[in-house]
Image (cartoon, rainbow, N blue to C red):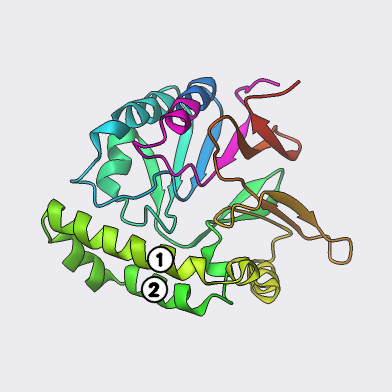
């Protein structure tokens, strides 16, 4: 399989960071292959963390350059926030030639049918502690105060939040951190969609229900040697893997 001009691609949860060189190299290879496709949607957590558009990690420079080259090739590049990089701003989006979608959900159309895109964390309603933390981090006043700090202070505060989050996750049941079925159905009902694409849970799957014909594609988190993602070829929406295995 190869990418072509009519393809639209959907990825999430790359969690790119300096410590994972293999993931960066895999992303660079993917972005190079994707040049010239119709569209690329990055549905959250492109980066492991983002402390503000004025505090970019130099190690991510090659990734930003590759994204810029992708958009320059004619590919419509779309960014959505994840739970790690929710401080990505329009300054960075403009820098790489992307459209930044700041809302939790967006609707697109594939083959004449509406498709719901979202990072997926809003569906994990059983994890009430996380939802409370999410509400705080997405609050405009909190974000303004955080971005007013020095970069060193932001790093210190982000590390403290990350340590607290890791400790909390270690004590939670796995099912609590997955999507809630009622929240999923409510999203289908609210948007009148039959298809949704999301990431966040790191549980890649293609869930299809015969009863109501709903389909939920869960994108995979990126590993050192492969990435699972979704591809629309102009007719069908499929889950596949990069590098391709013929």
Q: In front: 203, or 12?
A: 203
Observer-nearest of 212 and 21: 21
Check disc 2 and report the residue beneath it: 133
Is residue 240 a member of the stretch shown in magenta?
no
Element type at marker 1?
A: helix
Q: Secondary structure at mark 2?
A: helix
Q: In this picture, which residue range is highlighted in magenta?
A: 1-27
For this view, does 216 lie left or right of residue 38?
right
- The picture quadrant where one finds residue 87 is bottom left
**Does 5 sit left or right of 94 as displayed?**
right
Name the image quarter holding residue 102: bottom left
Residue located 13% across and 53% down the image: 152
Task: Give the Cα separation between the discs numbered 2 and 1.
Answer: 9 Å
Using residue 107 as the reference point, say whether residue 207 is left or right of it. right
The residue to which callout 1 is attached is: 165
Is 110 above or below relative to 121? above
Asked if the residue under mark 1 is in contact with the one under mark 2, i.e. CB atoms within 8 Å, the reply is yes
């Amino acid at each position: 399989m190869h990418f072509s001009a009519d393809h639209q691609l959907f990825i999430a949860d790359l969690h790119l960071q300096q410590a994972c060189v293999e993931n960066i190299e895999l992303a660079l290879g993917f972005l190079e292959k994707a040049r010239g496709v119709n569209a690329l949607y990055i549905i959250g957590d492109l980066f492991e963390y983002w402390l503000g558009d004025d505090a970019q990690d130099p190690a991510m420079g090659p990734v930003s350059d590759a994204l810029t080259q992708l958009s320059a090739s004619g590919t419509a590049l779309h960014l959505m926030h994840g739970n790690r990089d929710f401080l990505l701003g329009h300054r960075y989006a403009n820098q790489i030639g992307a459209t930044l979608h700041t809302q939790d959900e967006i609707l697109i159309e594939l083959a004449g049918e509406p498709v719901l895109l979202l990072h997926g964390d809003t569906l994990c309603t059983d994890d009430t502690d996380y939802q409370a933390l999410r509400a705080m981090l997405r609050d405009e006043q909190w974000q303004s105060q955080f971005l007013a700090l020095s970069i060193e202070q932001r790093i210190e505060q982000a590390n403290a939040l990350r340590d607290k989050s890791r400790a909390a996750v270690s004590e939670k049941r796995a099912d609590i951190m997955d999507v809630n079925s009622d929240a999923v159905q409510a999203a289908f009902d609210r948007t009148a969609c039959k298809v949704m694409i999301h990431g966040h849970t790191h549980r890649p799957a293609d869930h299809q229900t015969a009863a109501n014909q709903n389909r939920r594609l869960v994108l995979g988190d990126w590993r050192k040697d492969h990435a699972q993602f979704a591809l629309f070829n102009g007719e069908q929406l499929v889950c596949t893997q990069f590098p391709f295995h013929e």
